[in-house]
Amino acid sequence: MADKVRKALDRPVTLKFTNVSAERVLKALQKECPDVHVRTVGKGAAWDEPITVDLKGVPLGAGLQLLEDVLGYSIAVREYGLLIAPKDRMPTGAVLLHAFWKGKVAADKPAAGTTPAAQR
């Protein structure tokens, strides 16, 4: 799943919206990566705030960062896909979007102190 998510985050997209909800922007982003599961938690009033954006040829990851900024939420990469949630509802140890995407952190790397099966 990590490779699938990373590939999706690099995919160029165009986002052109005038006064639409964050929910509508998310749906447009999901159309760009239908094979990556996205789970949202704690949908509050921020999801209804109008967004105006005109971005051409930016990576999908940048569009997701826009949602993080507008909503005040975080996006984490999980073994099942992406989790969008308020910062205080992020699971312990969650790998955040930017760290995974730009830092090349593997979302499915073994826990500290364990040895991958291939090395045993």
Image (cartoon, helix red, strand yellow):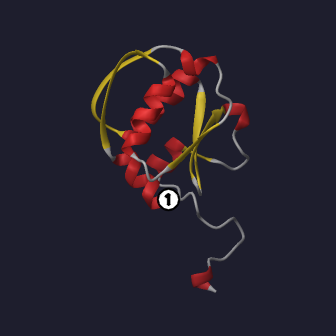
Q: Residue at the spot x=53%, y=59% of the render?
A: 106
Q: In which quadrant of the rendered view does residue 111 lie?
A: bottom right
Residue at the extreme bottom of the image, as rendered:
120
Q: Residue 71 vs residue 50: left or right?
A: right
Q: Element type at marker 1?
A: helix
Percent across and percent down for residue 17 are 35, 20
Please indicate whether residue 57 sits to the left or right of residue 35 in the image: left
Inspect the image, locate mark 1, and give the three-letter code of the amino acid beneath it: Ala
Residue 35 image position (x, y, % from top left):
44, 53
Q: Specify the quadrant that holds the C terminus.
A: bottom right
Residue closer to the observer: 35 or 99: 35
Q: Where is residue 90 in the image (x, y as percent from the top left)?
A: 69, 40
Q: Where is residue 87 in the image (x, y as percent from the top left)?
A: 67, 32
From the viewer's perspective, is 33 left or right of 99? left
Q: Which residue is drawn at 50% across and 42% down?
A: 98
Judge by depth and name the residue closer to the eye, 99 or 37: 37
The 10 Å Cα crowd at callout 1, few under 14, some 14 to 19, many 20 or more, is many
Tell me the residue that label 1 is attached to: 2
